[in-house]
Image: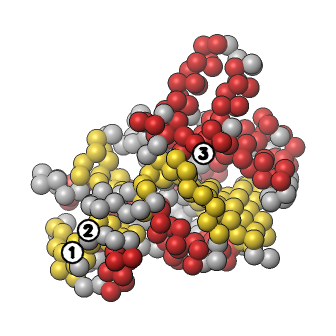
Amino acid sequence: MKFSKYMGEWLYGKDGYYASYKDIGKGGDFYTSVSTTKFFGGSVAKHIISLIDEGFLAKDGVVCEIGAHHGYFLADIIEFIYTLRPELLSSLKFVIIERFDNLQEFQKKYFNESFGDAISLTHYKSLSDFRCQNAFFIANEIFDAFPCELYYKGKTARVDGHEIEFDEDDKWVKSKADKYHKDRGEIAVGYEEFAKEMALACGKFEFMSFDYGEMAARPDFSIRVYKNHEVIPFFDENIKRDELFCKTDITYDVTFEHVKDAYEEAGVKFIELKAQMVALVDMGILNLLEILKANVEDKIYKQELEKVKMLITPNLLGERFKMIRFRSTFT
């Protein structure tokens, strides 16, 4: 089978890694910015309010998270909107795009326990099911979870009994590899369709996503497995793929130029790509810390400060992770 199908089964099949609830953070296989501190969501909340103040996002617009998993990110955003501009909770509509029924149920329960009837939350299985006029879309680490093809010197990989063989000819994969100057590495599958679905779902929107990678493609393979915070290179000679299949996270570095091209082909304008540390500071994460400092004990402030440092320190999450942003103004 094609590697993209194999990876899709690994992550999203009936018994796939993301088909059931998974701990993220200390008790899981990896950390994310969301699992590090609520101030990650707080910074996005502050940005959403700025979009409303500038008139781009309506007060009764939609805030939509795609691939929410636990739902903690959107919940953190809502919590900070309530802190900074509480009247918006009664006018904004909140949406989660989540394909798995069991995760939808977890999210509904968590939001009900957290907010009761204070907010309007709606679920959709996919962007293709969703339509609105004005929205802010947010996603965290979504593009690295798209299935990919593996490419090596003109040949595309297939999988036979968890073994990888580079012996397939695929014109589409080769065209992408040539375009991004890769003679080996990962070619993501599905970016173009995803961008088109978002462009059709909403007329006027901003989309923001955080992920790890670079604008230009890496010159080598980055595909790897995460298990109990251990990074296992996918082509490690000692790897036992049959034992890791569906039980661990599999991922790769994002080529943001590919994401950018997919959205521009869908008629959506690329705004910027920034290191996460720059993006969060620009959106006001330090201002939020100052508000916290003025309202809590010094011990609590210092605890949150240390967590925020994880997000904005260059050799931790601050530089390796990027924020990419797009806008559409179709009417």
Which color mode does the image show? secondary structure
The residue that disc 1 covers is 153
Disc with the residue nearer the chain's start (3 vs 2): 2
Q: Are marks 1 and 2 in contact (CB under 8 Å)?
A: yes
Element assignment for label 3 = helix
Q: Could you tell me residue 248's position as x and y percent?
A: 32, 51
How far separated are the C-alphas under marks 3 and 1? 36 Å
Q: Are marks 3 and 1 in contact (CB under 8 Å)?
A: no
Q: Are marks 3 and 2 in contact (CB under 8 Å)?
A: no
Q: Could you tell me residue 36's position as x and y percent?
A: 51, 35
Residue 44 showing in the rendered view: yes
Q: Residue at x 72, y 38 (%)?
A: 80
How far separated are the C-alphas under marks 3 and 2? 31 Å
Q: Could you tell me residue 81's position as x and y percent?
A: 76, 42
Residue 173 showing in the rendered view: no
Name the amino acid, label 2.
Answer: Arg
Disc with the residue nearer the chain's start (1 vs 2): 1
Name the amino acid, label 1.
Answer: Lys
Element assignment for label 1 = loop
Q: In this rendering, would 111 be left or right of 154?
A: right
Disc with the residue nearer the chain's start (3 vs 1): 1
Q: Residue at x 60, y 13 (%)?
A: 299
Furthest residue toward top: 298
Nearer to the camera, 141 or 1: 141
Labelled disc at residue 279: 3
In which quadrant will I find the N terminus? Answer: bottom left
Nearer to the camera, 279 or 37: 279
Q: Residue at x 78, y 47 (%)?
A: 49
Q: Residue at x 32, y 47 (%)?
A: 226
Nearer to the camera, 286 or 49: 286
The residue that disc 2 covers is 184
Q: Residues within 10 Å of mark 3 (few under 14, many from 20)?
A: many
